[in-house]
Image (cartoon, grey):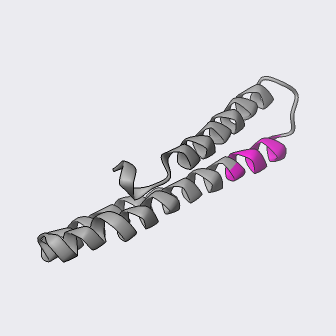
Amino acid sequence: MKQCMDVTKVQARLKRIEGQVRGISDMAGKDVPCEEILVQINAAKAALHKVGQVILEGHLQHCVREGIEHGDAEKTIADFAKAVEHFSRMG
C-alpha cells in the first residue's frame, strides 16, 4: 500500500484536516454563526475528498496497473470498480 502513495504527503494532509475538525469543534462551542461553521465543515469535507482522490489515483497507477499486468486482470478491475463505488459514496 505504501507504494501506491506518498505516505508523508497524505499524512500531512490528514493532519491539516484534523486541525480543521478541531477548529470546527471549537467554533461550535463559541458564539460563531452557523453559516461560518457550515463553511468550515464543507472545507473539511472537500479536503478529505481530495485525500481520497490522491489515494485512489495512486491505487490506480500502481496496484491496478500491476494487477492487470502481472495478475488476474478481471479480479483487479472488479476490485477497482468496488473501490471507486465506495469512494463515490463518500460525498
The residue lying toward the viewer, choosing from 23 and 11, is 11
Residue drawn at (49%, 46%) of the image: 7
- Please provide percent x and percent y for residue 83: 32, 62
* Residue 90 appears left or right of 15: left
Q: Check if residue 42 falls in the magenta segment.
A: yes
- Please provide percent x and percent y for residue 73: 16, 76
* Residue reaching furthest to the left: 72
Q: Using the image, determine if residue 26 lies above or below residue 44.
A: above
* Residue 61 occupies quadrant: bottom left
Residue drawn at (71%, 38%) of the image: 20
Q: Using the image, determine if residue 73 lies above or below residue 8.
A: below
* Residue 9 appears left or right of 85: right
* Residue reaching furthest to the top: 29
Residue drawn at (42%, 60%) of the image: 87
- Please provide percent x and percent y for residue 26: 76, 26
* Residue 76 appears left or right of 57: left
The residue lying toward the viewer, choosing from 88 and 62, is 62
The residue lying toward the viewer, choosing from 91 and 8, is 8
Q: Which residues are magenta?
A: 34-43
Q: Using the image, determine if residue 78 lies above or below residue 50.
A: below
* Residue 90 appears left or right of 73: right
